[in-house]
Image (tube, rainbow, N blue to C red):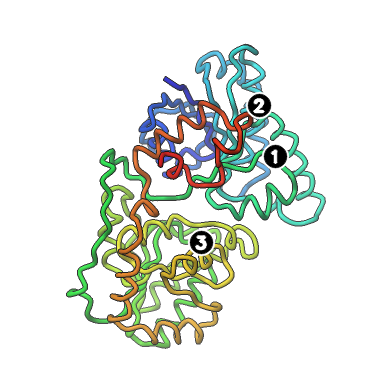
Amino acid sequence: MTSILYLAHDLDDAAIWRRVSMLEAGGAKVAVVGFRRLTTPLERPALVLGQTHNGKIVHRALSSLRVLTRAREIAREFAPDIIMARNLEMLPLATRIKKRCPQRNAPRIYYEVLDVHRLMIGQGIVAMSLRWLERRLCKQVENVIVSSNRFDEEHFSRYRQIASPPILIENKVWDGDKDDRLTPFRRDDVKRIGPLVVGWFGILRCAASLECLDQVTRRLDGRVQLVLRGKPALDAIPDFHRIVDANPHITFCGPYDYHRDLARIYSATDLAWLVDRYDANANSDWLLPNRLYESCAHGAIPLALDGTETSRFLRRRGIGVVVRDLRPVAVASVLLGLDKSDIAALARKQDAIDPSTWRTTQQDCVALVRLLAEGTRKRPASVVTPRIAAGDLAR
């Protein structure tokens, strides 16, 4: 059995545990080591290295450097075949652990990058220094894992951070279901009466989106309702609760359970808001968010912003709705142009797409673990096509 040591920058991020679940479903034995942001009990056992905080990249970096002295202890305790380091701050620890392992049993390192930190973007001295550090550390990395090819185009290939083309593992829905018989979600359009319902779910961190939707729902005076679910990032939107409480057309329902609630909350909406300008002209333009796959898998019509990788994804498949910009008048015009029959027609287009486009299967998980175990650097391109989704490797 392949043993994987997963180094996590935030053990309180549910996405960390979904990735761990995928690796275990693929047949790997996974040990988890990392930092925490919260103090509530963890859902799974892990070796906690310390406490860090959202947005405080310098503190997080220093915390990561301080635990380098534990590399030998970690190497002895876990003796992994593979190390997966999530985000740059975990990569120095991964390389140090590798050096502390016996040379004949040195683990392969995979560097998982779900977004490129804003400090690494641009031509300033800090950005160039961080990219230099990343490029140097990547010399010991087997490969990089990204969730969108745009991260390769805009960062890894552009700055020649690593020689191998990254492995693409999209943010598809994974609920731990080992039944690979996927079927399209069918909307109950008989219930589609009343106002147009827009759902914005997940980490709510885009101030521009909330400002736009606040004005749009007021302008349309009940013809469009906004439902918010998840966790508001109050460091990014400090007046979140004030705005929501003052608008009768916005409802905030709090956190939800990924495994139990996805189908219910998305199927109760007409449109899923995929716009995120938190890192405009960088990550926000490059990523393919969880919301894209969640909405399409559960019958909601995705709405994206023109010029982003998400809008390109939708246009290639002829689905979804794209707005030109976030001016309230422009967004209101698009929403007013949609009625329930339009939503039903868009849903039929979505239903016609292979559901494996949106969902990860156990077969995908097995293929992923096999790929990681066998390595990618020395295999010919005709055998490994790492730019395609891990799920396609099994087909």
Residue extending furthest toward the right: 125
Task: State which quarter of the image contains the C terminus.
Answer: top left
Q: CA distance from mark 1 to mark 3?
A: 31 Å
Considering only vertical position in the picture, is 107 above or below 139? Answer: above
Residue 362, percent across and down? 34, 38
Per the image, label 3 sits on a secondary structure element best described as loop
Q: Amino acid at mark 3?
A: Arg
Q: Quadrant of residue 177?
A: top left
Q: Amino acid at mark 2?
A: Thr
Near mark 2 (Cα within 10 A), the count class, few <14, some 14-19 or many ≥20, is: many
Q: Nearer the viewer, residue 97 or 287?
A: 287
For residue 193, side relative to residue 138 (left or right) = left
Q: Amino acid at mark 1?
A: Ile
Per the image, label 1 sits on a secondary structure element best described as loop
For residue 50, side relative to residue 292 (left or right) = right
**Can you identify the residue that label 1 sits on?**
162
Q: Nearer the viewer, mark 1 or mark 3?
A: 1
Residue 8, percent across and down? 52, 36
Considering only vertical position in the picture, is 276 above or below 256? Answer: below
**Can you identify the residue that label 2 sits on?**
95
Q: CA distance from mark 2 to mark 1?
A: 15 Å
**Residue at position x 48%, y 46% in the image:** 389
Task: State which quarter of the image contains the N terminus.
Answer: top left
Q: Nearer the viewer, residue 326 or 341?
A: 341
Q: Quadrant of residue 46?
A: top left
Q: Nearer the viewer, mark 2 or mark 3?
A: 2
